[in-house]
Image: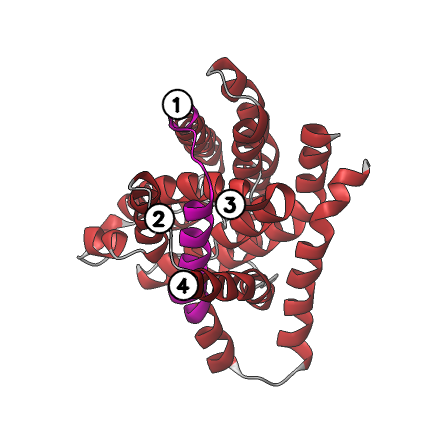
């Protein structure tokens, strides 16, 4: 494996450290729940705003980048829908695990983009995440709608990653240059976000699932970790992507499933145990597949 692929090892080491801390250090569930909320509502939004403000955005290439990301998600939805129909799953189980074929872990997305490509990578990935999060949430909730609650649009509208990306983008276009104290404040929060976010990802991993959906689960893993990044390598160049934006598109497509898929499945009465297994398996599997895709991109 080329040396460039080894760049992801620090991020995956932090995830594994999170697993070890959750298992061997008695910090309690409340600590990890509080840490995840801190990262999600404060630290990662600061990371996004800070990166977008510091980066000169190529708006001409942003359109094809977003289209590539959306088409990759649609590919995951189509392949998941077609493949899962052969397993004769219960409707609620189908709806619960279906989302694991196209949803993505925003923490790993921003951490990996920053590690590989610096602030320009975070800014580009931030645009993708900010645009893709509401689409992924709406589709996932729609699949679970018969068992869900009201207020779906409100939940999407209150997503802090969307607002942080939009705010940074608008301030960037307006030419806003934050004063030095504000720059330092955002930088300090951004620095803390990566390590704490990845520790929270590791602490949330669960490898106990339901044996009745293992076949369907392995299909979704193949779709998420192999088929989608492969699709990005064809769709991106077809739309004219190259350089950083093509790299970000493939990296986005190669991400493991979002941990929020478990929260949604549980809140809407779904099969949370199987979703938790899929999230954990895709995160651990991505430790093998993502370096391979990075090696192909940069090697």
Residue 107 spot, x, y in % from top left: 51, 54
**Considering only order in the chain, which callout, 1 or 3, is on the residue closer to the N terminus?**
1
Q: Is residue 187 above or below residue 59?
A: below
Which residue lies under the disc numbered 3?
122
Q: Residues within 10 Å of mark 3 (few under 14, many from 20)?
A: many
Whole-angstrom CA distance, mark 3 to mark 1, is 18 Å
Instruction: Please identify, in this view, whether the residue under mark 2 or under mark 4 is nearer the observer.
Output: 4
Query: Element at badge 4?
Result: helix
Whole-angstrom CA distance, mark 3 to mark 4, is 19 Å
Q: How is the image coloured?
A: secondary structure
Highlighted magenta segment, given as a residue range: 37-64
Which residue lies under the disc numbered 4?
182
**Considering only order in the chain, which callout, 4 or 3, is on the residue closer to the N terminus?**
3
State yes or no: residue 58 in magenta.
Answer: yes
**Considering only order in the chain, which callout, 1 or 4, is on the residue closer to the N terminus?**
1
Which residue lies under the disc numbered 1?
60
Quadrant holding the N terminus: top right
The structure residue drawn at horizontal position 20% and vertical position 50%, both measured from the top left corner, is 153
State yes or no: residue 20 in magenta.
Answer: no
On the picture, is 40 further left or further right than 6? left
Query: Element at badge 2?
Result: helix
On the picture, is 207 further left or further right than 126? right
Q: Which sits in the foreground, 231 or 99?
A: 231
**Considering only order in the chain, which callout, 4 or 2, is on the residue closer to the N terminus?**
2
Q: Residues within 10 Å of mark 1 (few under 14, many from 20)?
A: few
Please report contact status of discs 2 and 4: CB closer than 8 Å, yes or no.
no
Query: Element at badge 3?
Result: helix
């Amino acid at each position: 494996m080329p040396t460039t692929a080894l760049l992801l090892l620090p991020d995956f080491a932090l995830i594994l450290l999170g697993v070890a801390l959750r298992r061997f250090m008695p910090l309690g569930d409340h600590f990890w729940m509080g840490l995840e909320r801190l990262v999600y509502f404060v630290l990662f939004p600061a990371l996004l705003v800070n990166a977008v403000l510091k980066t000169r955005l190529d708006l001409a290439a942003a359109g094809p980048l977003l289209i590539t990301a959306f088409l990759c998600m649609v590919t995951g939805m189509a392949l998941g829908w077609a493949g899962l129909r052969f397993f004769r799953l219960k409707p609620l189980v189908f709806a619960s695990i279906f989302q694991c074929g196209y949803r993505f872990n925003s923490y790993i997305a921003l951490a990996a983009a920053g590690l590989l490509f610096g602030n320009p990578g975070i800014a580009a990935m931030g645009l993708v995440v900010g645009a893709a999060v509401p689409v992924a949430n709406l589709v996932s909730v729609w699949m679970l709608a018969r068992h869900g609650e009201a207020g779906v649009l409100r939940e999407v509208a209150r997503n802090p990653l969307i607002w942080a990306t939009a705010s940074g983008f608008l301030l960037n276009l307006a030419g806003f240059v934050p004063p030095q104290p504000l720059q330092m404040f955002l930088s300090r929060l951004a620095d803390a976000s990566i390590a704490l976010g990845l520790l929270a990802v590791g602490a949330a991993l669960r490898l106990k699932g339901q044996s009745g959906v293992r076949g369907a689960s392995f299909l979704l893993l193949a779709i998420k970790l192999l088929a989608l990044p492969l699709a990005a390598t064809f769709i991106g160049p077809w739309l004219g992507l190259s350089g950083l934006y093509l790299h970000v598109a493939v990296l986005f497509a190669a991400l493991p499933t979002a941990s929020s898929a478990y929260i949604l499945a549980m809140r809407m009465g779904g099969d949370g145990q199987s979703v938790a297994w899929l999230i954990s398996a895709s995160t651990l599997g991505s430790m093998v597949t993502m370096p391979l895709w990075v090696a192909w991109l940069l090697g």
